[in-house]
Image: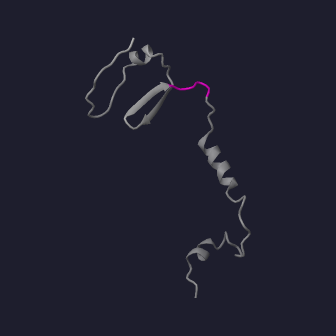
C-alpha cells in the first residue's frame, strides 16, 4: 500500500518510525541525495568497515613510494629553510 503525505518544511523533516517499518526498512538506512529527490533505502548489513585512521595511515605511508631522490642535504631537518629562505 502506497501512502503519500505533503509537508511544508521550514526547519527539517521527521519520518515516523511506522513508515519505516511499513516500508520494510531496518535500523540501518542509506540516504542518497540527487537533484530534486532524496532517497532512503535499507543499508546493506554486511559492509566492510575500515577505520578511517587505518586507511589514512596506509595512504600516508605510500606517499613517498614514487619520490625522486633529491639533491638537498638534510631536507627533513632544513625543510622550512629550503622552502622559505630567500636565495641571494
- In what quadrant of the picture does the C terminus appear? bottom right
Q: Decide which of 79, 69 is in the foreground and name it.
A: 69
Mostly what secondary structure, the magenta segment? Answer: loop
Classify 70 as above or below 45. below
**Outermost residue toward the front?**
36
Q: Residue at x 55, y 82 (%)?
A: 86
Residue drawn at x 62%, y 71% as measured from the top left: 79
- Chain part drawn in magenta: 42-46
Tell me residue 76's x, y (percent): 67, 69
Give x and y (percent) for residue 1: 39, 11
- Give the image quarter of residue 38: top left
**Magenta-colored stretch includes residue 33:** no
Q: Position of residue 59 (x, y in %)?
A: 65, 50
Seen at 29% across and 34% down, the residue is 11
Asked if the magenta segment contains residue 44, the reply would be yes
In the rendered view, would you say 51 is above or below 64? above
Please state if 21 lies on the left or on the right of 5 as rendered.
right
Q: Judge from the rendering whether residue 70 lies leftward or rightward of residue 50; answer left or right.
A: right
Q: Is residue 58 above or below residue 31?
A: below
Amino acid at each position: 500500500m502506497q501512502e503519500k503525505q505533503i509537508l511544508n518544511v521550514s526547519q527539517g523533516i521527521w519520518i515516523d518510525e511506522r513508515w519505516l517499518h511499513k516500508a520494510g526498512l531496518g535500523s540501518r538506512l542509506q540516504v542518497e541525495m540527487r537533484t530534486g529527490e532524496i532517497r532512503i533505502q535499507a543499508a546493506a548489513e554486511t559492509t566492510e568497515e575500515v577505520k578511517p585512521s587505518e586507511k589514512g595511515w596506509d595512504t600516508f605511508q605510500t606517499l613517498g613510494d614514487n619520490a625522486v631522490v633529491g639533491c638537498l642535504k638534510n631536507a627533513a631537518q632544513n625543510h622550512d629553510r629550503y622552502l622559505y629562505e630567500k636565495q641571494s
